Image: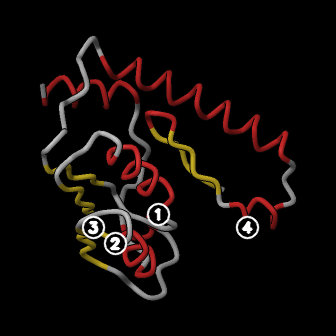
Amino acid sequence: MGAIASGGTVLVDEALVRALGLGRDELERTVAAELRELERREQAYADSREPPEVEGKTVMLVDDGLATGSTMRAAALAVRRLNPARVVVAVPVAAPETCEQLRAVVDETVCVLTPHPFRAVGLWYEDFAQTSDDEVRRLLADAA
């Protein structure tokens, strides 16, 4: 029903919220809970590192795939606030309409496969297990 990102970016699919019959209070509770989880993850992953300086640089946002694109749209809008020179989205698989819609908020999209019908990202992977916090921390430390 939406997505959030750093810097206070909150996107809500109002049509979906109405279709699901969710009240404003329930929506606000959900957003507050997700913002707390985002803050927890940012603190868990930061490991006293400063965020990278992206002003004037090309930022590439990568995901394992895009269904609705809500999360990627939120990420792109959050990054745009940091004044990069360009924002590029790269994914191995996505719904065709999602790649097309993202072109309105980023400078370039690279969607390797855009099957029709799309159905779900996980169908395109042999192993679609979630990434643990420990694995994220290890990968970030290796990259630093």
Q: Residue at x 41, y 18 (%)?
A: 43
Residue that badge 1 annotates: 69
Sequence-wise, the earlier of marks 3 and 4 is 4
Mark before the other along the chain sequence, 2 or 3: 3
Expressed as whole percent of the image width and height from the top left, the position of residue 48 reads 27, 11
The amino acid pointed to by label 3 is Pro
Label at residue 103: 2
Instruction: State if disc 1 and disc 2 touch (CB < 8 Å).
Output: no
Q: Which residue is mark 4?
A: 15
**Under tag 2, what secondary structure?**
loop
Circles 3 and 4 in contact, beta carbons < 8 Å: no
Residue nearest the observer in this picture, 109 or 56: 56
- For badge 1, the amino acid type reads Gly
Q: Is residue 58 left or right of residue 136?
A: left
Identity of the amino acid at label 2?
Arg
Q: Which residue is mark 3?
A: 92
Q: Is residue 22 left or right of residue 91?
A: right
Q: CA distance from mark 4 to mark 1?
A: 15 Å
Quadrant the C terminus occupies: top left
